[in-house]
Amino acid sequence: MFKGIIGDVGRVSSLINKGENKIISIKSKLAKELTIGSSIAVNGVCLTVIKKNDENFSCEIIKETLKNTNLKDLKIGSYCNLELPMKISERIDGHIILGHIDEIGKIISFLKKGNYYSLKIKIKKENRIYLVKKGSIAVDGISLTIQDIFLDSFLLYLIPFTYENTNLKYKKVNEEVNIEYDYLGKYVLNKRIET
């Protein structure tokens, strides 16, 4: 599990096709803390480390993950949000994130407004049910708070620290982001539907 607090913005150093899968290598200061078999969130996607040294680590991305996340669009030099799994003893500064992406959203507006940034993301209409005003959502692995909800989109506000210390500062309108809806909200909703 993760909590949506980004530990580093890494950079893709190599991409190798392996049949329908891809082997991705990322340069990051977090590489020193990893071991073979460790989990790490890359743009909010939980991956397994298969190789590492003190500067880079590698993960294999299967076809299904490539199809359902924005990892398929990564190129050499792309910036990625990285987070190590949380320890049971840690405070949860963000919210509980599993690293399982629900859908790919698209940025439809991204504006600087005074001392904050306004980010609007388009989603599938049927997934609006998972959104709650002032509730949590993970965007490319970042724990954020929903400010407003529309028919097929939602609005976020970013403080300058979040903008500067995540891959969002490299994102543009029409680019895709990984979305994971709040697990606890999905669980409660599922239980209500069952009863």
Image (spheres, helix red, strand yellow):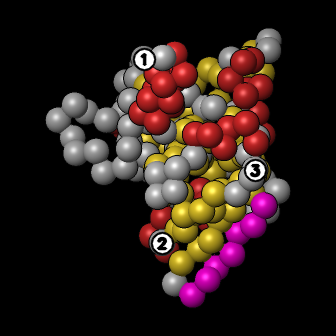
Q: Which of marks 2 and 1 is nearer the N terminus?
A: 1
**Residue 15 in the image: x percent, y percent?**
72, 32
Q: In this view, does 82 lie to the left or right of 169?
A: left
Name the residue at 40% across, 23% down.
38
Q: Nearer the viewer, residue 104 or 31?
A: 104
Label 1 Cα neighbours within 10 Å, binned few <14 / some 14-19 / many ≥20: few
**SS category of the residue bearing label 1:** loop
Tag in front: 3 or 2: 3
**Residue 183 in the image: x percent, y percent?**
46, 32
Marks 2/1: CA–CA distance = 34 Å
Tag 2: amino acid:
Ile
Label 2 Cα neighbours within 10 Å, binned few <14 / some 14-19 / many ≥20: few
Marks 1/3: CA–CA distance = 38 Å
Write down the region rendered in magenta.
108-114
Tag 3: amino acid:
Asp
Tell me: residue 20, above or below residue 174.
Answer: above
The residue carrying mark 2 is 159
Whether residue 129 appears in magenta in the rendering, the answer is no
Name the residue at 44% across, 29% down.
188
Tag 1: amino acid:
Gly
Q: Which of 12 and 153 is in front in this view?
A: 153
The residue carrying mark 1 is 37
The residue carrying mark 3 is 152
